[in-house]
Image (tube, grey):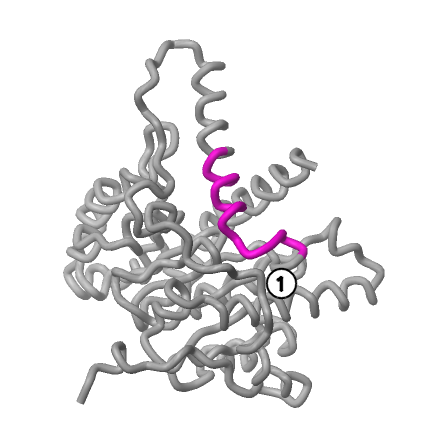
Amino acid sequence: MASPCLTSSTPKVMPSLHNHLNSLSQVRFHRTDYDGPGKFDERETGSNFGAHDHSHSHSHDHSHHDDDTKQQLRDLLQARFKRRSGPYSHRGYTIGIGGPVGSGKTALTLALCRALRDKLPMGVVTNDIFTQEDAEFLVRNEALQSRRIMPVETGGCPHAAIREDVSANLGALEVLTRRIAWEEEENGNSPEQNPPLMLCESGGDNLAANFSSELADYTIYVIDVAGGDKVPRKGGPGITQSDLLVINKIDLAEAVGASLEVMERDANKMRKGMEIDGESGPTVFASVKNGDGVDEIIRNILKAFDDAHKLVKEAQ
């Protein structure tokens, strides 16, 4: 029998959890601004994506140093904005949460919703291959109002729906963005003044999976210590190119014989390609279920969210 990864059909969105989401089955055919994958070098898996020019000379002028750092961030944000499908009013700023099965992606999604839902309008799109398990979990735990949680069944390898053909997720996120805008306006709030934060949780996948920049504005990759302390040095786009690497379940390290020091060393080495201002891409050690490290994850998300919206306002 052929591998499901080779024979899977185009991802489809299945009917909703509740009657008011019955139209969800039509989302797969929703017309979006997605216009194709673009050039290879512009994608996360391409050689030039997010590259920074470090050839300029350095001096002890700290103002020059700070300006260089700000310009690196500005260039990266501008490149990503050009790659996304439409403005933030069309699809809210999107956090992509990926990682292997059982690493704690849904637990992190729940923790983020609980911490931020009273501060920002939020919506969540979950991905599972054959079920709506993660969406059902979030609804049962009242992460958000159920109408702001939308499941997508990918019908094949999860990475296909976040990288190769992102249209199912784009459609779901666009529907949720419009729904949130309508609700905010009905409550007397301005969507422009209070833009939404969208979470898109991938189905569990391997280290090669990372979000396309057409879909996610900021990516979090979640691994856990139960897989062993060798995981960070195995690399792959999830480890090396995510905006934030979360090493979860640190409370289990002693039980499984994993060294957090080894994982930190290897993560810093592997994430040199995401460096800004000479530092490796950020890594957070967490025990999400116990609340450890969640505040630091939120600080990274909110900074990226604020920086992106400031850049748009400056350009207007």
* Residue 95, x across and y down, in percent: 49, 57
Q: Which residue is mark 1?
A: 122
Give the residue furthest to the top.
60
Looking at the magenta stretch, what is its main secondary structure? helix
Quadrant position of the C terminus in the picture:
top right
- Name the quadrant containing residue 310: top right
Depicted 13 relative to depicted 274: above or below: below
Seen in the image, is 99 located left or right of residue 215? left
Depicted 182 relative to depicted 218: above or below: below
Quadrant position of the N terminus in the picture:
bottom left
Circle 1 SS class: strand
* Residue 132, x across and y down, in percent: 47, 83
Residue at horizontal 17 percent and vertical 50 percent from the top: 233
* Residue 127, x across and y down, in percent: 44, 74
Seen in the image, is 274 located left or right of residue 257? right
Residue 238 counted in the magenta span: no
Residue 81 counted in the magenta span: yes
Residue at horizontal 23 percent and vertical 44 percent from the top: 270
Judge the density around disc 1: few (<14), some (14-19), many (≥20) Cα neighbours within 10 Å. Answer: many
- Name the quadrant containing residue 177: bottom right
User: Which residues fall within the magenta stretch?
Assistant: 75-89
Between 99 and 169, the one nearer to me in the picture: 169
* Three-letter amino acid code at the position of disc 1: Met
Residue at horizontal 63 percent and vertical 40 percent from the top: 312
* Residue 302, x across and y down, in percent: 55, 47
Seen in the image, is 153 located left or right of residue 283? right
Seen in the image, is 305 located left or right of residue 132? right
Depicted 102 relative to depicted 48: above or below: below
Residue at horizontal 32 percent and vertical 40 percent from the top: 48
